[in-house]
Image (cartoon, helix red, strand yellow):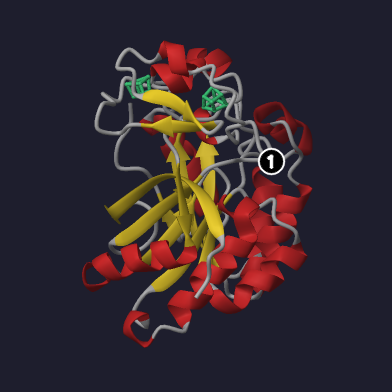
Amino acid sequence: MSNRCASINKILPFSCVDGPGNRLAIFLQGCNLRCKNCHNPYTMGICDNCGDCIPTCPQQALSLQNGVINWNSASCEQCDTCIQQCPRQSSPMTFTYTVDELMALTRKYAAFINGVTVSGGESTLQLPFLIDYFKAIKEAPDLKHLTCLIDSNGTLSLNGWQKIAPYMDGAMIDLKSWNEDTHIYLTGRGNQRIKESIKWLANNNLLTELRLLYIPEKTDYLENIELLSQFIHSLGESILIRINAFHQHGVYGEAGNWRSAQKQHIDIFSKELIKRNIFNIKTPDIYS
Ligand code: SF4
Ligand code: SF4
């Protein structure tokens, strides 16, 4: 039994793109990176119940009740006006779940899924909830078939990974650039800690996949291909490298003017990795 709560932006009962197999995907609210290319910037902030979004809603679906923002999902038409207006890059359309409530939801779909993936935002910002949720799954005899994966930006400390490690089956981590300066430009923070997380997870057989997002003229993988390849080799032979292609569509701010990655960009990048004996590569199926 756990009454620990999490702020949740979205739950997909069945996802086939958030890890292997069919998965219950849970997207937690709040992120500690500020990626210019983020497709869901309204998952970054935590709502402070200021109420600024209430008059922007054309359906009158928002109100303040006892000082807390209330969203009437029945009236909502998903126009996204409120999240575009929020000054904190948050959303009034979030849910609060206790671990017990999320376990009840997990049981509802358990017969049809291979596992759960907790994503974000940045899922590890709500680490105590994550630990209690995964622990409850691992201790439940009827949920033994479910794997517990984390989709993370990798900024969690090694101390944090050590705490969740006994209850998780793996983590999928993004390395958004090789150089520290490029990473700060793209996300607002450096990548030293992310590289340390990736190494620690790989050493402990918990790195499910390493994700590399290719943004033409912005990411620096090709300029640093030797160092990047050495880093990947140091993680072990079996690590899956997933190359993702940046899509301009749906991105706000300056990144809305960046070029989308095309098939030739991804082909050149994956060929450079293959030349350096990195073969376990998954490339995207769809390009914009
Ligand atoms: S979602 Fe944003 S605008 Fe609306 S109450 Fe929360 S912080 Fe204020
Ligand atoms: S998305 Fe937001 S602004 Fe649009 S109808 Fe729903 S609550 Fe209102």
Tell me the residue that label 1 is attached to: 224
Answer yes or no: is residue 226 visible.
Answer: yes
Q: Write the residue at 40% across / 22% down.
A: 250
Whether ligand 1 has any atom under 8 Å from the Cβ at mark 1 is answered as no
Residue 244 position, x and y percent, is 45, 41
Q: Residue furthest front?
A: 66
Give the quadrant of residue 44.
Answer: top right
Residue 33 position, x and y percent, is 66, 37
* Secondary-structure class at tag 1: loop
Q: Residue furthest left?
A: 112
Q: Write the residue at 66% across / 49% down.
A: 228
Residue 52 position, x and y percent, is 54, 16
Q: Quadrant of ligand 1?
A: top right
Q: Write the residue at 62% across / 73% down.
A: 165
Return the residue nearer the eye: 235 or 224: 235
The mark tally for this picture is: 1
Give the quadrant of residue 284.
Answer: top left
Return the residue nearer the eye: 191 or 156: 156
- For label 1, the crowd category at 10 Å Cα-Cα, with few meaning under 14, some 14 to 19 and many 20 or more, is few
